[in-house]
Image (spheres, rainbow, N blue to C red):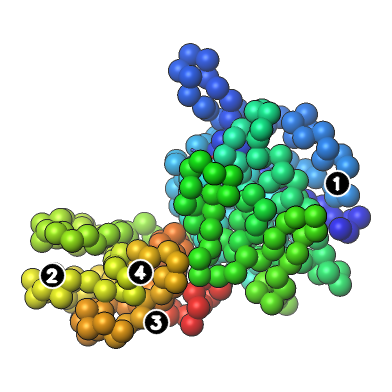
Amino acid sequence: MSLNSKILVIYTGGTIGMMMNKETNALEPFPFEDIYVHLPMLRLVNAEISVKEMLPLIDSSDTTPEFWVRLATLIYDNYNDYDGFVVLHGTDTMAYTASALCFLLENLSKPVILTGSQLPLGVMRTDGRENILNSIEIAAAKKDGKPRVPEVCIYFEDSLFRGNRAYKDNAEHFNAFHSANYPKLAEVGVHIKYNDAFIRSVTDHSLKLHTKMDVNIAILKLYPGITKQAMQSVFNTEGLRAVILETFGSGNAPSKAEFISILEEAVNKGIVIVNVTQCKGGGTVEVGRYGASLLLKKIGVVSGHDITTEAAVAKLMYFLGEGFNNAEVKRYMGISLRGEITV
Ligand code: ASP
């Protein structure tokens, strides 16, 4: 690790810094006044560490696009003063925040590592200690003078994931995150083994901050027996611009005319519908593999490829916030902007 790394730790809330409220017996965030009190071993790390709290501290269930913009702005404002950033964040919506940051911070060339824990730092068996220490070490790591991992990532248990590829799939185990459609960027054991071939490279362009996200989207998860009314209640939402349609398998949906016509009507009304599969592993939309997905394509539903729902939410809000028209949104959903899809 470089002796000269400066790392900014941004504490936003989440289990990692929570303690028990004695009256309610529920976990609530508490102010993280001195990181060295909780983690005295941080003094051994060869990096200068500063901490900023993003107030109010939140349970990440309270995350909003406005919060993402504040966090991205904080990173942007401090970008030139630090070599890397570690964001302490609740695990529940960490994958959404990681996805949002990757779009809001265009041309990012420094590590932004999100981490958290399943057990609060104050608990003896906490996983937070290792998660923070390893995240800081990765954020400070350099190769040939350049940041080792210049992208938005999630670090959890012993794995570093591309932020827009990861998702939380366990509320109990310490390995709470996975990334079924993209390899881990690094694995931590005795050594930190970087998977260089899959890590994005540093760009010469300067960092550009985006600050607009349009929340006029919805997610519609298909299930056998879904009613016309349930579907229409989503598509009739006032101001709706785009819908993530969570389909079956390789992007399939019921082929009944009644079902297809609701979607077709929505597309004709100007709502962008993106086909994202409910399958996590090997989860890519393969239009045309089955007739059921071909019908969707025919009526103008666009393929989300192997994007996660979390990244699709962030990507759509970002495109719509940027003022893209429908044709642009549809076109760019098929292009990998930050490594979020395999095309
Ligand atoms: N509810 C917490 C949060 O997401 C859970 C966690 O941090 O793991 O903020």
Can residue 321 be seen in this snapshot?
A: no
Question: How far across and how far down the image is residue 192, in percent?
Answer: 77, 60
Instruction: Find residue 331 and name its label.
Output: 3
- The residue under label 1 is 45
At x 31%, y 84%, the residue is: 289
Q: Secondary structure at mark 2?
A: helix
Residue type of the residue flagged with mark 3: Arg
Can residue 271 be seen in this snapshot?
A: yes
Question: How far across and how far down the image is residue 154, in percent?
Answer: 61, 56
Residue type of the residue flagged with mark 4: Val
At x 65%, y 40%, the residue is: 127
Q: Is residue 6 above or below residue 38?
A: below
Distance between the alpha carbons at the discs numbered 2 and 1 = 58 Å
Residues 125 and 91: in front is 125
Of mark 4 and mark 3, the one earlier in the sequence is: 4
Question: How far across and how far down the image is residue 14, in percent?
Answer: 55, 38
